[in-house]
Amino acid sequence: MSLFKSGNPTLSENKFRDTVISTPISSENTMTIGGTLNKFGFMLLMLMGSAFYSWKEAANLGENTMPLVIGGAIGGLIIAIVLIFKKEWSPFLAPLYALLEGLFIGAISAFFNAAYPGIVLQAVGLTFSVGFGMYFLYTFRIIRATEKFKSVLIAATVGIGLFYLATMIIGWFGVNVNETMPFINGGGMFGIGFSVFVVAIAALNLILDFDMIEQGSAMGAPKYMEWYGAFGLMVTFVWLYMEILRLLSKLNRR
């Protein structure tokens, strides 16, 4: 069984290996870790810029923020699906994904901050702290992306994804998930424990993402895969932020 796995569907062995096989490239045009992280930083700035704009617009619109939320979420999802199949479009679509996710995050954050003042600043600080912490743990090999580690983490990530998908489908049929499953979505000990578990899984997925980027660089993936790697890392980063925001909102309800 291959050691090259990630719970993030955008980062996998085949994604990088296929580009190496299909694209003859010289060493100076290959993917690097530093280049990927630089592109991630650029995308992060774009996300923060569009999030700031969305935050301001949400404040002006009051409760009518759904166009920003839905537009950013659906647009980002479409871009993500396209990128999974068209990796070579990453230099153009990855920045667009960051802008769309910024619209979504900014509007959602404004909503949470209106309900719990100061919660967004806490969530942002914790997200960056966790991100840097995971990078430190991976860089110094304190946490290693072993085969067993990957298998357990991927199984947990898939399970969480299926649960969220099920709750979304149930919501489409007019069922109030908060009422039907208050023990998970509420501010009780079980609900908080569930959120802590999901935050931990999201954080540990960063370890897998760092490993995938390192392996892609070692395999000599083409230069445009730096944008793809940065995109995959941002997918996990956004997920981590949203889960931390949800956890803090539960703690504020107590």
Image (spheres, rainbow, N blue to C red):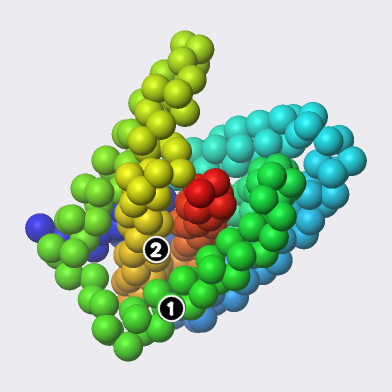
In this figure, which residue is indicated by the disc labeled 2? 203
Within the image, what quadrant is residue 123 found in?
Answer: bottom right
Identify the residue at horizontal 69%, vertical 45% (top origin): 115
Q: Which amino acid, by three-letter code, is at mark 2?
A: Ala
Q: Quick one: SS at disc 1? A: helix
Marks 2 and 1, how far apart at CA: 9 Å
- Contact, CB < 8 Å: mark 2 with mark 1? yes
Q: Name the spot of residue 201 as percent of width and height, x first.
A: 33, 57
Q: Name the spot of residue 21 as percent of width and height, x first.
A: 32, 59
Q: Name the spot of residue 166 as percent of width and height, x first.
A: 36, 26
Q: Quick one: SS at disc 2? A: helix
Residue 98 can be seen in this image? yes
Give the residue furthest to the left.
1
Position of the N terminus, as image quadrant, is bottom left
Q: Name the spot of residue 33 as percent of width and height, x first.
A: 46, 78
In this figure, which residue is indicated by the disc labeled 1? 133
